Image (cartoon, rainbow, N blue to C red):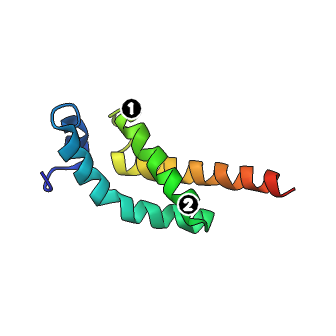
Amino acid sequence: MNQLSDEDLYTQLSVAPSRAFQVLYDRHSGPLFRFIYRFTVNRESAEEILHDIFTLLLSGKFRQNDEGSLKSWFYTLAKNKSLNFLKKASFEIK
């Protein structure tokens, strides 16, 4: 299952959800966490954003289409959620 593409693993979520999810999580969680952490500079917030992204994946928010890959969806979502965190944090400080 490790040799399957991200999109193939995504389609496997309906057949073998725990194994497909584990492979996707293992493949992307480390790099995504580091990417998010660079924005937030807060370990707890980075972990929360990372878990939100994978929760959205499990809830079926990703739609396969010609516009982008699952990896690009992960990073776009990570960037947007991180920027929203920073925006919210700046309001709380003021």
The image quadrant that residue 29 belongs to is bottom left
Q: Residue at x 73, y 51 (%)?
A: 87
Res. 39 image quadrant:
bottom right
Around disc 1, counting alpha carbons within 10 Å, would you say few (fewer than 14), some (14 to 19), or many (20 or more)? Answer: few
In front: label 2 or label 1 = 2
- Label number found at residue 49: none
* Helix, strand or loop under label 2: helix
Amino acid at circle 2: Glu
Q: Which residue is mark 1?
A: 59
| Residue occupying the point 25% across, 51% down | 22
In front of the other: 57 or 93 = 93
Q: Earlier in the sequence, mark 2 or mark 1?
A: 2
In the rendered view, does 80 fall on the left or right side of 24?
Answer: right
Counting from the top left corner in percent of width and height, residue 69 is at 34, 45
Marks 2 and 1, how far apart in space? 22 Å
Residue 84: % across, % down: 66, 48
Mark 2 = which residue? 44
Q: Amino acid at mark 1?
A: Ser
Q: What residue appears at the point 49 percent right and 64 percent down from the top-left corner?
A: 35
Q: Please, is residue 47 above or below residue 73 in the view?
A: below
